[in-house]
Image (cartoon, rainbow, N blue to C red):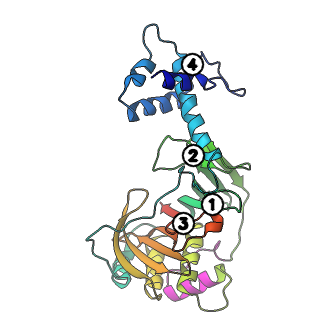
């Protein structure tokens, strides 16, 4: 117990750039983090000693909050070349045991039946992404971000990009905004910008068609392809498309049919994605990378796309099974 208290006392409760004195009130974020810490670690005498009460100094709250942030920062800074920071690093999605795979052809048929209903095509996107950053001399890191792009009738648009990880609401998030990777508050705004009108009529800025053959040509133009697209090309093109447009029922049906005709994209069963949505998973094994497409089992809409390493890359600190990237699209 004495050792634990000494560790807390040694933490600096008043950073040089802090907005409050150590014996002043905590801000809302610090209060929230401390409350979560006490909930997650409910046992032991240390918790009882740190709860505020008659005769107990407010400073203890600041010490705990500072110690939590300091520990997370040290995990990032002190990790050696053979370790991977745990912050924001997702594990690969796992297919539910015993679930029945649904062939893409059948899913395409379902999507085509639903084309008379909503939703409709909308320019702009709402996507949560996890992406791995690698370097020669540092362990790989995973950045979790949420991006919302909205277009107005006059051709202008806004983009909001925040650092957040819905798997761990309220916890600090790793970000590389402004240079070196560092921890920021959940919901930290990386970019909030308005853009003037743009009237480009080239894919992917122009509206996507809702016939499979025309959509294939559209995606080839968007990816600057001169030859028929491979399955990997189609997956990459779908990623680009969904980062520009929120597809309607007809466009989703066309994309599903296009993917159903692609070679090597096999059904594997049901998964629950990182936003808690249940979908059907389809896997394509590329060179060194496995791609998993997650689709709504009722409408054929693309919910997510995950890429994982199928071979280790020791020079970059990458292990087999590490998630390279993951995108989850929302309406």
Marks 2 and 4 sit apart, C-alpha to C-alpha, by: 24 Å
If you read the primary sequence from the N terminus, does the residue marked by circle 4 or circle 3 appear first? 4
Q: Which residue is mark 4?
A: 25
Q: Is 63 located above or below residue 95 in the figure? A: above
The answer to whether residue 302 is magenta is no
The reply to whether dot 1 and dot 2 touch (C-beta < 8 Å) is no
If you read the primary sequence from the N terminus, does the residue marked by circle 1 or circle 4 appear first? 4
The answer to whether residue 205 is magenta is yes
Note whether residue 185 is visible.
no
Residue segment shown in magenta: 203-220
Marks 2 and 3 sit apart, C-alpha to C-alpha, by: 22 Å
Q: Residue at x 46, y 7 (%)?
A: 55
Q: Is 20 located above or below residue 146 in the figure? A: above
Residue depth check, mark 1 versus mark 4: number of the one nearer the observer: 4
The reply to whether dot 2 and dot 3 touch (C-beta < 8 Å) is no
Q: Which residue is mark 2?
A: 173
Marks 4 and 3 sit apart, C-alpha to C-alpha, by: 44 Å
Residue depth check, mark 1 versus mark 2: number of the one nearer the observer: 2
Q: How many neighbours does mark 4 have within 10 angstroms: few (below 14), some (14-19), or many (20 or more)?
A: some
Snapshot quadrant of residue 36: top left
**Mark identifier at residue 319:** 3
If you read the primary sequence from the N terminus, does the residue marked by circle 3 or circle 1 appear first? 1
Q: Residue at x 60, y 82 (%)?
A: 218
Please provide percent x and percent y for residue 326: 52, 64
If you read the primary sequence from the N terminus, does the residue marked by circle 2 or circle 4 appear first? 4
Q: Which residue is mark 1?
A: 153
Residue depth check, mark 4 versus mark 3: number of the one nearer the observer: 3
**Mark identifier at residue 318:** none
If you read the primary sequence from the N terminus, does the residue marked by circle 1 or circle 2 appear first? 1
Q: How many neighbours does mark 3 have within 10 angstroms: few (below 14), some (14-19), or many (20 or more)?
A: some
């Amino acid at each position: 117990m004495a050792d634990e208290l000494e560790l807390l006392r040694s933490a600096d409760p008043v950073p040089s750039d802090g907005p409050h004195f150590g014996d002043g009130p905590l801000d809302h974020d610090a209060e929230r983090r401390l409350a979560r810490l006490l909930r997650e670690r409910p046992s032991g005498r240390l918790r009882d000693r740190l709860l505020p009460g008659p005769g107990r100094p407010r400073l203890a709250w600041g010490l705990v909050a500072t110690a939590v942030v300091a520990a997370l920062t040290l995990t990032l800074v002190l990790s050696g070349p053979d370790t991977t920071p745990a912050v924001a690093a997702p594990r690969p999605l796992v297919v539910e045991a015993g679930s029945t795979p649904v062939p893409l052809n059948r899913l395409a048929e379902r999507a085509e039946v639903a084309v008379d209903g909503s939703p409709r095509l909308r320019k702009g996107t709402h996507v949560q992404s996890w992406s791995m950053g690698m370097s020669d001399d540092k362990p790989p890191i995973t950045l979790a971000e949420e991006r919302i792009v909205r277009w107005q009738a006059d051709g202008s648009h806004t983009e909001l990009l925040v650092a957040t990880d819905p798997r761990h609401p309220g916890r600090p998030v790793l970000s590389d905004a402004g240079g070196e990777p560092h921890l920021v508050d959940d919901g930290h705004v990386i970019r909030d910008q308005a853009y003037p009108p743009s009237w480009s009529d080239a894919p992917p800025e122009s509206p996507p068609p809702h016939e499979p053959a025309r959509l294939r040509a559209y995606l080839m133009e968007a990816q600057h392809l001169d030859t028929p697209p491979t399955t990997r090309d189609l997956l990459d093109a779908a990623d680009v498309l969904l980062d520009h447009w929120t597809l309607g029922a007809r466009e989703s049906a066309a994309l599903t049919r296009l993917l159903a005709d692609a070679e090597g994209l096999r059904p594997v069963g049901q998964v629950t994605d990182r936003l808690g949505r249940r979908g059907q998973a389809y896997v394509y094994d590329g060179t060194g990378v496995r791609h998993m497409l997650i689709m709504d089992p009722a409408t054929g809409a693309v919910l997510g796309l995950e890429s994982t390493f199928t071979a280790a890359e020791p020079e970059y600190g990458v292990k087999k099974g590490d998630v390279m990237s993951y995108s989850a699209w929302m309406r």
